Amino acid sequence: MLQISHRGQLMPPSPIRKLVPFAEAAKKKGIKVYHLNIGQPDIETPAPVLDAVRHFDFKVLEYSHSAGNESYRRKLVEYYGRVGVDIHYNQIIVTTGGSEAILFAMMTCLDPGDEVIIPEPFYANYNGFAVEAGVRVVPIRSDIRSGFALPPIQDFEAAITPRTKGIMICNPNNPTGYLYNAVEMETLKDICLRHDLYLFSDEAYREFCYTGTHTSALHLKGADQHVILLDTISKRYSACGGRIGALVTRNKTVLDAAMKFAQARLSPPSFAQIAGEAAIDLPGNYFDTTRAEYQSRRDLLVTRLNQMKGVFCPNPGGAFYAMAELPVDNTDNFCQWLLESFSFEGQTVMLAPASGFYGTPGLGGQEVRLAYVLNKTDLARAMDCLEKALEVYPGRLS
Amino acid sequence: MLQISHRGQLMPPSPIRKLVPFAEAAKKKGIKVYHLNIGQPDIETPAPVLDAVRHFDFKVLEYSHSAGNESYRRKLVEYYGRVGVDIHYNQIIVTTGGSEAILFAMMTCLDPGDEVIIPEPFYANYNGFAVEAGVRVVPIRSDIRSGFALPPIQDFEAAITPRTKGIMICNPNNPTGYLYNAVEMETLKDICLRHDLYLFSDEAYREFCYTGTHTSALHLKGADQHVILLDTISKRYSACGGRIGALVTRNKTVLDAAMKFAQARLSPPSFAQIAGEAAIDLPGNYFDTTRAEYQSRRDLLVTRLNQMKGVFCPNPGGAFYAMAELPVDNTDNFCQWLLESFSFEGQTVMLAPASGFYGTPGLGGQEVRLAYVLNKTDLARAMDCLEKALEVYPGRLS
């Protein structure tokens, strides 16, 4: 009898996609579904970025360099310079999305059985890459009541074992929207230096900070050997389908080993590298406009949520996600019920139950993640739906 | 002291790229280098394929479905139908190049410590993906003297252990160019059925067969649960940089598990899916033209090689590679010497030493792989260089 692998069985299904069949069924019944469940921005990819791809002039769609086109990597040096990160182009490996940067980092730095500490809730797909790499994710809890701030040092220290090889963060955070401040980043650095750990820093949402400035892990002094930056153009330029990211580090041993993983898969996608390169020449105010749009959506969403009886939503400092606590028995049930059994004026809303973002079983059962990736009109309607739904949901807690 | 992972150390450097610094140095000296070392075709990507990408009309570069656009998968059903493979669109997962299909197949079907039998010499990057998946590659030797035909059944049987989970082939073969015939394919099927093994069949070069017809593993009757097809548009349409491939199987358990790996990395690249979809509407004679071109190159290359004293090159039945035995001490040394110390009329040739394509240490030391991906004028000049080089190489065997 043929068997699939143990890891194939262990591999978690995507928590943000598992409700999709219920959404499809709702749509077949004629119900409009507002998608706040997935981080797919509705903001248009900047026209110059798309035009650059339209105007490519090669005749053979060749492999690029395994580390990405040199012209793109040199351009990325400019980009990083603008955010205060001094880096050489050969310290950048262009990856197939941020996803591949995460996989390469885990594969390069950790062996099967090794552990990586991640504050929970965290980006659910870290679990998937950890299963691929045989790595154990050790979650330490950040709390909705403190707005998901960095857990205290003693929680990290308590979680460290001889197998711990690194700490992974996402800043600003998906799913919580929390923006780690400079003091918290220094704290992380100190722990990593003291215990000889890698600091994996996923900075996919760097430009989307509303209540403070962004501290990149590559700003930290004296941590050059420890910091592995994981990056992507997906959210920055609404270019999710391009599948272009980057692994950036000043640690040459890590770079050299990561390059072998990059060579094995030959090269990152050629077309979207053109997009990524063109994006770096966007006008300086591009991010101001996008940031202002996301911020006004955040304000609408968070205000509406906190006006609902029994709902608590800390104000996120960055990214385009918010986590909210709902007065329901269980958000897995509630989110499915929203699609299966509820509609308000022919509409409903799709949310991501938070349980999939926690590593500790049982946590997140009262929480949902909301991605504010829709325009404010739709967002307001989605909030109307949620408000009505909470009034009539049979599993509402009193 | 920070360490990289054991697997990061184990990961093999690319054997076809390790000579690159020597090629770059030669070019800096003004020497023209003919690249027969890498399977990057010079044949133009068909204009309608590139035009389809130029004329995309979306405004947001969104994630596609994790299994690839449904429209593309439905189109692929047409394509497979034309090569006699009856498949449903939901039995196809579009991957990021054939590379990702190989990785997903290993991750889904094999656990760390499991074994996969591969006739050697084989595509060197199988080693890399095996290291990522913790899988042990068990090579069994195919011999240049028999043109690299499938090794006898008893060699497979002797290699099978309780940890053996599959056999992997590439048909027609990279690096040997060998085309497995229908009888050999049935033999492989029988072994897989008898020993409950997966048959991983990499058919990247399906259309490039010169001395027989292609038998796909998906043509084999009664092996639906065993066969995992690994595919790519890279060579078929000279579209290597697109990074679009596919994992195709009728085994639903494998598909469901592979989909979880696909979901973790969100989606394959969007732009090149457009290219892949357009390619399926190319005129019916597209492959005739391309095949004829490769075949005439093969004829030139193989004839020239066998005319050189002490050189032996079996006539490859497919793909665009040939393996040749050279009268030299060691082809690693010879290939480096070609770049470092040799030129003829200001020109030299870059070849891939075969040692990197063998799993058994010590094999392949007299062999090189040549990719006939250059036009015939360049190919003839490259053969002139090789001929002269063999006359003067200090490590020539008598």
Image: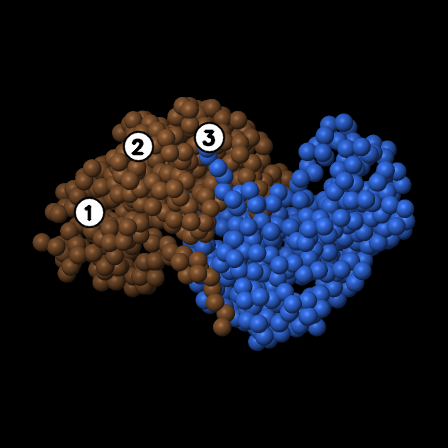
Chain colours: A brown, B blue
Q: Give neighbour class at mark 1: few <14, some 14-19, many 20+ (Cα, 10 Å).
A: many
Residue A70 occupies quadrant: top right
Q: Which residue is mark 1?
A: A325
* Position of A253 relative to A266 (above/below): above
> What is the spatial separation of the Cα atoms under label 2 and label 3, in whole angstroms?
21 Å
> Which mark sits nearer the N-terminus, 3 or 1?
3
Residue A121, horizontal then vertical, whole percent? 29, 45
- The number of callouts visible is 3
Residue at the spot 39% in from the left edge and 26% down from the top edge: A220
Figure quadrant of the C terminus of chain A: bottom left
Query: Which label belongs to residue A180?
Result: 2
Does residue B93 appear anywhere in the picture?
no
Residue type for callout 1: Glu
Q: Which residue is mark 3?
A: A225
Camera-side mark, 2 or 1: 2
Residue B260, horizontal then vertical, whole percent? 42, 57
Disc 1 secondary structure class: strand
Residue B21 occupies quadrant: top right
Please, which residue is most extreme toward the left here? A398
Residue type for callout 2: Tyr
Residue B181, horizontal then vertical, whole percent? 71, 68
Decide which of A101, B365 is in the foreground and name it.
B365
* Position of A132 relative to A306 (above/below): below
Decide which of B348, B327 is in the foreground and name it.
B327
Disc 2 secondary structure class: loop
